[in-house]
Structure formats: C-alpha cells, structure tokens
C-alpha cells in the first residue's frame, strides 16, 4: 500500500511538472504571437481615431451635390457600405462650359478638397477644334466621399 501511495505521488508530481512546463511553453507562444499588447492596442486605437477624423459627416454627399449645383449633371457610380462608414463615388459632368465656369469649377474643387472625407478622384476635360481655335467641350469630375454613419444607423442598420 505504501509503495502504491509513493508511486501515485511520483506520477502526480511528474504530471504537475509536465503540466507546468506545458503551461510555460503555451504562455511563451501566446506572448510571442500576441498582437494585443497594450502598446499595439494603443497604436491601433490611435489609427482608428485618426481615420474617424478623416471621415466626413453622414450628409457629406448632399453637401458635395449642393456644391456642384444644378448646372452639373450628377451620376452616382457606386456606394459601398462598410462597418461604421460608407464610400460614395459620384461623377459630375458639364457640357460646353463657358469661360466663367472655369474659375467657379477651380474654386469649387479647392473647397471640396478641404471638406473632411472628400477627395477628387479624377478630373477630365475634352477639347475640340484645331491649333488656332480650341475650346473646351466637356468637363468631368469624379469625387470620392468617405462619410461616417450616424449612431442611429450603427444601432439600427
């Protein structure tokens, strides 16, 4: 009976020693792979905060459309809903722009680029005529708008 007790105690001690070694090895592996250390999480939070600042308000698309006004033809290319924000690609066209339209268009593009979440993705123009008589026939501006969702939309999608 004493021998059996001694054998059981030895087995238990060996198992505890092995378990302790396994626990240390698993802890080492977790620590080596962990991307969730306090410094990593703080950096990730800072990145998310910076991204949130770059997003425009929920109604930024309406602001951009109002900026172009009724003299431009608007076409929605795409809207991509993401977790907490959306990306809108809008195309605005103007046929046969007048000289007065140029300064307005340049000023508008400068104002739009200052809005949070708004970027000019593409600007195109087409001209007609020859070397001595050339005129602008067509303007096209593609705008990319990143806007956050309201808290209501996040709770009730």
Image (cartoon, helix red, strand yellow):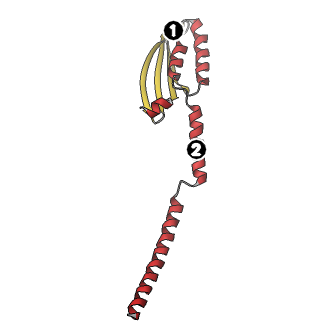
Foreground residue among 103 and 81: 81
The residue to which callout 1 is attached is 130
Instruction: Name the residue furthest front.
Output: 1
34 in relation to 79, above or below: below
Report whether 125 appears left or right of 38. left
Say few, some or many: other residues with alpha carbon within 10 Å of mark 2 (under 14 / 14 to 19 / 20 or more): few
Could you tell me residue 48's position as x and y percent?
56, 40
How many numbered circles are shown?
2
The quadrant of the rendering that contains the N terminus is bottom left
Seen in the picture, residue 94 relative to 3 is either above or below; the reply is above
Residue occupying image coordinates x 59% and y 6%? 100
The residue singled out by tag 2 in the image is: 45
Horizontal arrangement in the rendering, residue 80 relative to residue 113 (left or right): left
The secondary element bearing badge 1 is classed as loop
Q: Disc 2 to disc 1, how far (Cα)? A: 57 Å
Circle 2: element type: helix
Residue 71: percent from the left, percent from the top? 50, 8
Sooner in the amino-acid sequence: mark 2 or mark 1? 2
Quadrant of res 4: bottom left
Q: Residue at x 58, y 27 (%)?
A: 116
Q: Position of residue 51 (x, y in %)?
A: 57, 36
* Image quarter in which the C terminus is found: top left
- Where is residue 8 drawn, in percent x and y? 40, 86
Given residues 53 and 145, the one toward you in this image is 53
Q: Are marks 2 and 1 in contact (CB under 8 Å)?
A: no
**Residue 2 in the image: above or below residue 109:** below
Tell us which disc is closer to us: 2 or 1. 2
Q: Residues within 10 Å of mark 1 (few under 14, many from 20)?
A: few
Q: Which mark is residue 76?
A: none
């Amino acid at each position: 009976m004493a021998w059996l007790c001694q054998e059981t105690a030895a087995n238990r001690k060996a198992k505890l020693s092995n378990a302790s070694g396994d626990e240390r090895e698993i802890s080492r592996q977790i620590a080596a792979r962990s991307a969730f250390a306090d410094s990593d999480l703080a950096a990730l939070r800072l990145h998310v905060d910076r991204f949130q600042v770059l997003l425009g308000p929920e109604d930024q698309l309406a602001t951009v459309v109002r900026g172009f006004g009724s003299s431009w033809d608007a076409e929605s290319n795409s809207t991509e809903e993401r977790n907490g924000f959306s990306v809108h690609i809008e195309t605005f066209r103007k046929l046969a722009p007048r000289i007065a339209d140029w300064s307005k268009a340049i000023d508008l593009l400068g104002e739009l680029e200052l809005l949070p979440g708004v970027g000019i993705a593409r600007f195109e123009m087409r001209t007609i005529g020859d070397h001595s008589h050339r005129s602008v026939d067509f303007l096209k501006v593609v705008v990319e708008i990143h806007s956050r969702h309201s808290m209501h939309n996040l709770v009730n999608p």
